[in-house]
Image: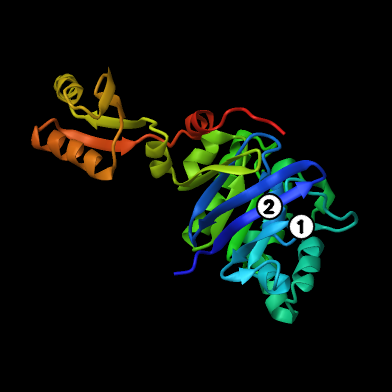
Amino acid sequence: MTALLQVKNLSRRYGKVRAVSDLCFEMGCGQITGFVGPNGAGKTTTMRIAATLDVPDGGDVLVDGTSVLVEPRLARMRIGYMSDQFHPYPNLDVMQFLDFFARAYGLRSRRRIETVHSVANFCGLGSFLDRPATGLSKGMGQRLHLAKTLLHDPALLILDEPASGLDPRARIEFRDLLKRLAAAGKGILISSHILPELGEMCDSVVVIEKGERVVAGAIGDVQREAQLEQTIVAKVTREADAEAMQRHLAELPMVGDVAVDGVQLRFAFVGDDDDLAGVLAGCVAAGYGLVEFSRDAADLEDIFLKTTKGRLQ
């Protein structure tokens, strides 16, 4: 199966600065991929090239098998790009703003109106259609930016710092929207400096530094490649079971420190899914009364700090 997004040996220079250097990675439909790196690492340049807004010095980007260099118009119909800056046109309300872009995407008559209302409702803008587009709060403005990006039903969303400046509630609501889009089959490439939050929504990550790929892949695979410990959270029915399970876990070679807080345990683990399944099976067989057993949210901060060296350009 062809990957939804393929970045192939991408390079881009600005004068003497090599913003992107021989960058390669790919992602599929239904994936949320975090695009992580220090300031100036080349994230925005890569995203702009993938969105057909810049031209590389070398390499190519394929969107659903279509080259953004050879067939940019066709590629654009599969791409929804959301830049890190949003400046809506003045003197337009939300409905007029969305209708303008729906027309630009070639939507006509009843289909256009239905699409605008459908996308506005999905993004929580249904009761804001008569509001001035320039008078929205930061959070509602980002929803409008996302709605504009979704009008032509793109398969790939390229989101550059979409949660920047949002308050906690707005970030949570925005994150839930992205999860729903991924569940519907859309691939999402998203950059952000809010790494703990990014780790809660992403299933894969690409880390770059000075325009070069450092690591890429499923978050669990990257953690193991970087020899990072995962944090496992377990809950049992009685404190006596927790203490017994702590002693049991402490004897296992892939388990690190085990902390107990009442009936809850947290422990560090290094191993693959089969190894973790073995730990779970052993605890169940020992009769510890397990009611919860799960990975803690992936810590992209640890991945970022472990794999990058703080080099700037």
Amino acid carrying mark 2 in the image:
Ser
Residue corresponding to mark 2 = 11
Q: x and y percent of residue 76 in the render?
A: 69, 68
Q: Nearer the viewer, residue 124 or 76?
A: 76
Asked which colour scheme the image uses, the reply is: rainbow
Would you call the spot at circle 2 few (<14 residues within 10 Å), some (14-19), or many (20 or more)?
A: many
Using the rendered view, name the quadrant where residue 313 is placed.
Answer: top right
Horizontal relation, residue 29 to residue 295: left or right: right
In the image as oriented, which residue stretches furthest toward the right? 91
Q: CA–CA distance between discs 2 and 1?
A: 11 Å
Point 9% across, 37% down: residue = 285
Nearer-the-camera pick, 51 or 313? 313
Judging depth in this view, the residue of 99 and 309 nearest the camera is 309
Whether residue 123 appears in this view of the structure is: no
Most foreground residue, 98 or 28: 28
Q: Quadrant of the N terminus?
A: bottom left
- Identity, as a three-letter code, of the amino acid under mark 1: Asp
Residues at circles 2 and 1 in contact by the CB criterion of under 8 Å: no
**Rendering coords of residue 252 (x, y %):** 18, 27
Q: Is residue 190 left or right of residue 183?
A: right
In the rendered view, tell whether residue 107 sits above or below residue 255.
below
Residue found 76% across the figure and 63% down from its top: 98
Q: Is residue 83 visible?
A: yes
Residue lying at 62% horizontally and 35% vertically, measured from the top left: 193
Q: Residue at x 36, y 30 (%)?
A: 229
Instruction: Tell me where residue 284 appears, x and y as whole percent.
Output: 13, 37
Callout 1 secondary element = loop
Single out the residue that lies furthest toward the left. Answer: 286
Q: Which residue is identified by label 1?
A: 54
Residue 309, given in percent of the width and then of the height, sits at: 58, 28
